[in-house]
Image (cartoon, helix red, strand yellow):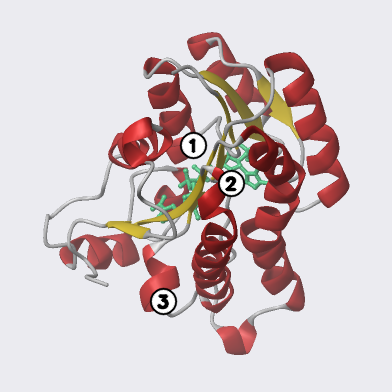
Amino acid sequence: MTKVALVTGGTRGIGAAICKALQAAGHKVAASYAGNDEAAARFKAETGIPVYKWDVGDYDACAAGIATVEAENGPIDILVNNAGITRDGFFHKMTKEHWSEVIRTNLDSLFNMTRPVIEGMRARGFGRIVVISSINGQKGQMGQVNYSAAKAGDIGFVKALAQENANKGITVNAITPGYIGTDMVAAMPEAALQRVVAGIPVGRLGKPEEIAQMVVWLASEHGAFATGATFSINGGQYMA
Ligand SMILES: NC(=O)c1ccc[n+]([C@@H]2O[C@H](COP(=O)([O-])OP(=O)(O)OC[C@H]3O[C@@H](n4cnc5c(N)ncnc54)[C@H](OP(=O)(O)O)[C@@H]3O)[C@@H](O)[C@H]2O)c1
């Protein structure tokens, strides 16, 4: 069952692993990214997957970008809202800019990316929407009030949208990764990272591929009965 998949933030980290896994499962995959042209070019050369640059926080850019992706690849059947950022710091020192950047990239993006594809999915009677939320949207995390708020919002989005579209062959699910070994986590101070790993019962960071295989399953026919769900993949760090 070859489908057309679009993965936001698909050129690095978890998104890149998702793209490769969907491609290996036989899907036609497109990846979007924000601005790191070098990483995108490397990813494209390695995988042959086409890459598209726009800001998922900008509705008009998303609508135009999706139109291009669909013109070149066909209607989007599988949408993986993966792009995300952190702007960490205690709330009592947080700037409005850091609040807004995280909300628009990690939460507004769900409207911006999903609204342009949902009508087509409903008309065709098939769709798979997967949102990469976070463990910290479930448990909260000091230093990440902005990120935790956005990621918790992602889960509410999934639950409501799943109800609206369950009878149209469309599933909508969230994955809440724990700490995964990507650039995002590498940016953490070493001491803080060591404290985090010490709190993970499995005793290590997760691998991007361990998130990617969950997306492949959700996108498949076997995932048809799973909707509105939140799948925790966190090495036992938090049992929601
Ligand atoms: N890593 C973890 O431990 C972890 C844990 C829980 C949840 N998550 C979530 O998983 C997702 C992926 O995380 P990651 O660790 O793989 O991140 P990453 O390595 O930092 O990669 C982020 C990707 O998102 C893209 N991106 C960022 N802002 C964007 C924007 N405004 N518009 C379009 N694309 C944008 C980046 O594009 P450029 O390359 O152009 O910058 C890049 O491709 C995020 O939503 C993150 O919150 C991660």
Q: Residue at x 37, y 19 (%)?
A: 25
Q: CA distance from mark 3 to mark 2?
A: 19 Å
Indicate the position of residue 23 as horizontal and vertical percent values: 44, 18
Q: Residue at x 59, y 65 (%)?
A: 87
Rendered view: 129 above or below 6? below
Does the closest atom of ligand 1 sit within 8 Å of the Cβ of label 1? yes
Q: Dot 1: within a 10 Å radius of its alpha carbon, few (fewer than 14), some, or many (20 or more) residues?
A: many
Closer to the N terminus: mark 1 or mark 2? Answer: 1
Indicate the position of residue 73 as horizontal and vertical percent values: 68, 16
> Which label belongs to residue 141?
3
Closer to the N terminus: mark 3 or mark 1? Answer: 1
How many numbered discs sit on the rendered protein? Answer: 3
> Which label belongs to residue 15?
1
Indicate the position of residue 10 as horizontal and vertical percent values: 55, 33
Of badges 3 and 1, nearer the viewer stands 1
Image quadrant in which you'd find residue 78: top right
Give the residue pinned by disc 2: 83
Q: CA distance from mark 3 to mark 1?
A: 23 Å
The reply to whether callout 3 and callout 2 are in contact (CB within 8 Å) is: no
Does the closest atom of ligand 1 sit within 8 Å of the Cβ of label 2? yes
Label 1 sits on a secondary structure element that is: helix
Indicate the position of residue 68 as horizontal and vertical percent values: 80, 24
| Residue type of the residue flagged with mark 1 | Gly
**Residue 48 visible somewhere in the drawing:** yes
Q: Residue at x 38, y 42 (%)?
A: 224
